[in-house]
Image (cartoon, helix red, strand yellow):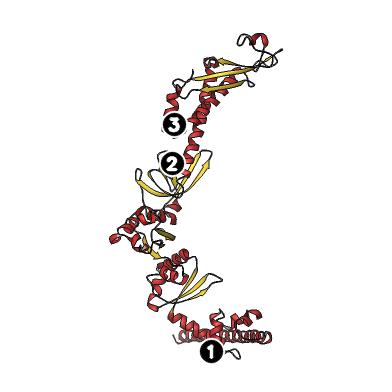
């Protein structure tokens, strides 16, 4: 046959490329059929049999026995049929064994090309199927080259790409360095599987904890969420299925060895391990640690929360560049506004003073309105009658009067502010004029 020792070739390719032998055998059959039809004719009915034990290939050309041949590549006369089967009859289909050597050099070359092409397709499919199973996992590779800011990583069977946005800040690699990354996605493209890696994705942090913390890998400790500012700071929320296992302690490890291994992998990224709690207020307090929370005001409808902290903890709660509160928002899924007690008290006083300008609104009613989200006459002026009635004991007429009064007060305040602005502008203009006159006088004196 024109392919020598086919069994050895199939076994070798299957082993080296990770392709199932059945795929290669089917590819071989398709190639032989293609070569046979190029030699015999496009209508030829060809069957290929492969013996997986011996590696022997048999090719049969089936022809129908007819009285008069119209298509020589698929029909033969009864007289010719007797040469293969003396008992054949009109309408029978005879399988004639053919020698593949008869295909000729061009047909053999065509078969070889088909085999190569099919094997490449099979290899691409095998690589895709292999790596799609590793999506969402950590993988190790070798830095192979650099392409316009991206790092091309050799994974053995395939190459992967670590794009600039998926690289950690201030990380430098050179060719031949080992690299560890998260398989972000595996795309099936015409040139083969494109594997995208990431070292900045929050799930990379999650997978590192699964690697370093046995309790996480076993499911005893659950990671409820993770958020990162890559290279700077991260927060991980954890809980335990076993009351005897401290989830934070398990993740930190003896003398902090477990979390330190992760910190080293992330080039010094600070990691806060937060105790998850089904009570959202407690969870938020944990998420904003190490700041101490004085009180929280929850808005369930908008999933937002005003967090009041002691004055000395305000900067800690917010964090450098707002990192702490931003990461806390991400892992809790709530919008958090952090305020100091002094600022909150000032806002509270201003709100109460504003609301108590309304007729019939005393301290207790102002408190009810303020806690319901109406912090000033501006809020009251924009409110709906039904909303006011649902909060305080007023009828529809009284609620309308309150809203109208708020609009009048607001209009008056705006007019006063406008007048004050005009007075300030006039005063500033007079001061400028006085300065100009002083300059003129100095010039005259000189």
Residue mark closest to the camera, 3 vs 1: 3
Dot 3: what SS?
helix
Q: CA distance from mark 3 to mark 1?
A: 83 Å
Check the image and report above or below for 17 versus 305.
above
| Residue 67 found in image quarter | top right
Nearest the viewer among 17 and 142 is 17
| Residue 238 found in image quarter | bottom left
The location of residue 144, given as percent across then percent down, is 39, 42
| Residue 97 found in image quarter | top right
Residue at mark 1: 363
Instruction: Mark 3: give few (<14), some (14-19) or many (20+) Cα within 10 Å.
Output: some
Q: Which mark is residue 14?
A: 3
The tag earlier along the polypeptide, 3 or 2, is 3
In the picture, measured across the screen, residue 172 lies left or right of residue 278, that is left
Instruction: Find out whether the residues at labels 3 and 2 contact each other: C-beta distance under 8 Å.
Output: no
Nearest the viewer among 182 and 168 is 182
The tag earlier along the polypeptide, 3 or 1, is 3
The location of residue 446, given as percent across then percent down, is 44, 85
Q: CA distance from mark 1 to mark 2?
A: 70 Å
Q: Residue at x 55, y 84 (%)?
A: 368
The location of residue 312, given as percent across then percent down, is 37, 77
Dot 2: what SS?
strand
| Labels in figure, total | 3
Dot 1: what SS?
helix
Q: Is residue 321 visible?
A: no
Q: Which mark is residue 159?
A: 2
């Amino acid at each position: 046959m024109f392919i020598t020792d086919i069994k050895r070739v199939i076994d070798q390719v299957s082993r080296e490329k990770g392709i199932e032998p059945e795929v290669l055998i089917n590819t071989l059959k398709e190639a032989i059929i293609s070569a046979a039809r190029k030699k015999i004719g496009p209508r030829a009915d060809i069957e290929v049999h492969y013996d997986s034990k011996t590696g022997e290939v048999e090719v049969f050309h089936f022809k129908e026995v007819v009285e008069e041949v119209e298509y020589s590549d698929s029909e033969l006369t009864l007289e010719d049929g007797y040469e293969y089967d003396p008992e054949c009859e009109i309408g029978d289909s005879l399988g004639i064994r053919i020698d593949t050597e008869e295909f000729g050099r061009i047909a053999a070359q065509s078969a070889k090309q088909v085999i190569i092409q099919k094997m490449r397709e099979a290899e691409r499919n095998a690589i895709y199927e292999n790596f799609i199973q590793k999506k969402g996992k950590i993988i190790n590779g070798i830095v192979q080259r650099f392409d316009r800011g991206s790092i091309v990583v050799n994974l053995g069977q395939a190459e992967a790409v670590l794009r600039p946005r998926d690289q950690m800040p201030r990380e430098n690699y050179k060719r031949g360095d080992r690299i560890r990354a998260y398989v972000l996605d595996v795309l099936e493209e015409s040139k083969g599987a494109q594997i995208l890696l990431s070292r900045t994705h929050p799930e990379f942090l999650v997978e590192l904890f699964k690697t370093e913390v046995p309790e996480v890998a076993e499911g005893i400790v659950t990671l409820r969420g993770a958020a990162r500012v890559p290279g700077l700071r991260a927060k991980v929320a954890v809980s335990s299925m076993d009351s005897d296992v401290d989830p934070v302690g398990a993740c930190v490890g003896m003398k902090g060895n477990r979390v330190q291994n992760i910190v080293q992998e992330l080039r010094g990224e600070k990691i806060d391990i937060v105790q998850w709690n089904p009570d959202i207020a407690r969870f938020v307090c944990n998420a904003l640690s190490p700041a101490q929370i004085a009180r929280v005001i929850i808005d369930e409808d908008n999933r937002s929360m005003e967090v009041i902290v002691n004055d000395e903890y305000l900067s800690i709660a917010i964090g450098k560049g707002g990192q702490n509160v931003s990461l806390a928002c991400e892992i809790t899924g709530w919008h958090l506004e952090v305020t100091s007690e002094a600022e909150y008290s000032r806002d509270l006083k201003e709100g109460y003073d504003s609301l108590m300008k309304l007729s019939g609104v005393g301290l207790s009613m102002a408190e009810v309105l303020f806690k319901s989200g109406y912090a000033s006459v501006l809020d009251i002026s924009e409110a709906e009658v039904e909303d006011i009635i649902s909060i305080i004991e007023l009828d529809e007429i009284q609620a309308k009067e309150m809203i109208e009064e708020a609009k009048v007060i607001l209009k008056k305040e705006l007019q006063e502010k406008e007048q004050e602005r005009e007075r300030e502008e006039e005063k500033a203009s007079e001061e400028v004029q006085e300065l100009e006159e002083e300059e003129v006088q100095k010039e005259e004196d000189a």
